[in-house]
Structures are given as structure tokens and as C-alpha cells.
Amino acid sequence: MVQLNKIPLAEGVQCQVLGKCEFMSFGGSVKDRMGIRMIEEAERDGKLKPGYTVIEPTSGNTGVSVALVCAVKGYRCIIVMPQRMSQEKADMITGLGAEIVRTNGTSFEDDDSHFTVAKRLNKEIPNSIVLDQYTSSANGLEHYDSTAEEIWAQCGGNLSMVIAGSGTGGTLTGIGRKLKERNPNIKIIGVDPEGSLVALPDSLNVLRGKKHEVEGMGHDFTPTALDQNVVDAWFKCNDKDSFQMARRLIKEEGLLVGGSSGSIVAAALHCAKDLKPDEKCVVILPDSIRNYMSKFLSDGWMEERGYL
């Protein structure tokens, strides 16, 4: 965990803003925590055995984590990922020896969505298993058992707010449940991109269906792994603000983060405005710039989309 210095000061935020650097994990993202837990729980439950095939639908980071664990344990791995996700993620997954299937569906119910294709492959391939991070209880439990405990310890039990993005919802759910058990007054803020319909109240989702380019957050459905009751408030983010803030985090704070970290820090600058100097706001920084070298790090890519 590191303190953000220049950006909060420049934006008039008085409290300590602390970044939980999940991009420094072994596979480069917050998804590493639940990736290995889902596999090991499936092994303990007898659902995953030597010689089996592991299939996982993902926007990329979970795919990297699962492919990495499968490489170590010797399982065949098939990752199903939407075409719009970065080539860097795809290259990382294939580099780990996994097979990758790209999909073009725009809704999770489409015949060509990564969810539908993963289920179809599961039916077609004998001795295969879909881990399914979107419904797995291991997802939220891992953050309940580890991430939340780390945050509590690193802050000495003194924190006022935690801000995290909503992908599968496991991070928000696990952290939120544990920290509210420790202190019900801690505010949990969920970040959801424009175009997604996960945020509550539903009136926030005025641009539902709008395509967004920040990866790893937002859906046209509410994942089972997300407990919306632990979230005190939602913040809707847009691509331009997210990518510009991610670039500032790299340039001004020296943190080599991905686009969703920009979304989360942009939310913090808004939501933590009223916190006092002796209070702490923790932001979850989910993944690294490694996944997006050809995207928002490029001036040309940003200019083409009107983000610069």
C-alpha cells in the first residue's frame, strides 16, 4: 500500500489517499487472489482432477491468473475472452500455454458472448470445468479472508472509506463485508462505468448500453458474486476521465496502473472531498499498464478517440 501525494494535493483532497497496489501481484492483477483459490477449491471438492480442462470466461485478468496457475499445475486451459479486450492480455495468456477463444457478443445472453461460448465448450469437452468467477463464492471469500484483512492491518484499523471497481463484484463484496464487520461506519464506494447497469439506484444508469473502453468493469447484468447491499454509494465513471487519470497516476505518482485504476482514483477525488486530514481513503488499484501498452498509454490512441 502506498500513499498518493501529488494528485490529491492538486485536487484539494485533505485526507490520506492510500493505493492498494494489486497490480504488483504475481500475475499482475487483483484477480490472482481468487484465481488460485477457485482452482484449489475445485480440486478439494473433487471437481477438478489431473487431466481435466479448465475453462474460464473473462475480460482478461482472471484469464492470465487462471492460465498461470494451470501452467504450474499442469491442466489444459481454455480462456474465453471478448474481442475488444487488449491484445496484450491475449498474448500473455497464450504465452502461458493456454488456448484462447475470442468472442464478439455484446450481451452476456448472446450466442457469441464469452459466457455462452464457455458453457458450450464445457458441454463439448469431456472432463472439463468452468470455474465461473461471476458466480463463484471463492471470489468474494478470498477478498474477505485476505484483502480486507491486509487493508485493516495496513491502516491500523483506522480508515474511513474504501473505493473499488465493480467487475465480478468479488472485491467489493469481500472487502465490504469484512470491513463493515470491523467498523460499520466505513464507507464502501463502488465504481461502475457509464454504459453499465450494475450501479444502484438504477437511475444512475442513464447511459445503459453505451460502449465503454475501460476494461474489467461494468456489465449488462448483475453478477451473482456481487452483494450490492455492502456498497454505500456508487460512482459512475467515463472513459475520458478514467484514462486521463490513469496517465496522471503514471506520470505524477509513478504508479504503472491500468485504466480502471484511473476510474477508481477519479471517484476518490470526488467522494473523499469531505474527509478530514486525519482520515484515510483506500483505493484498490487492480492491474498494470502492462495490459494496455498499445491503448491509453499511446497519445495517438487517445487522440483518435478524443480523450486528449
Image: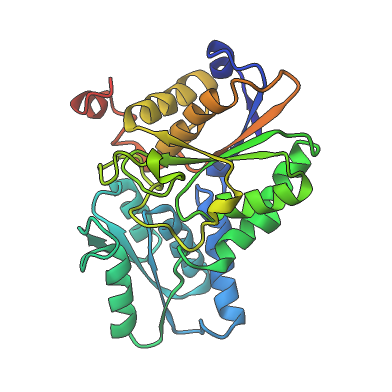
- Corner quadrant of residue 107: bottom left
Q: Colour mode? A: rainbow
Point 45% across, 75% down: residue: 75
Q: Position of residue 198 (x, y in %)?
A: 42, 49
Relative to residue 250, is residue 157 depicted above or below?
Answer: below
Q: Position of residue 106 (x, y in %)?
A: 23, 55
Residue nearest the viewer, comparing 287 with 170: 170
Residue 79 seen anywhere in this rendered image of the structure: yes
Relative to residue 281, is residue 203 depicted above or below?
Answer: below
Q: Position of residue 23 (x, y in %)?
A: 53, 42
State how many labels appear. 0
Relative to residue 130, is residue 283 depicted above or below?
Answer: above
Quadrant containing the C terminus is top left
Point 51% across, 61% down: residue: 225
Residue 26 seen anywhere in this rendered image of the structure: no
Residue nearest the viewer, comparing 200 with 23: 200
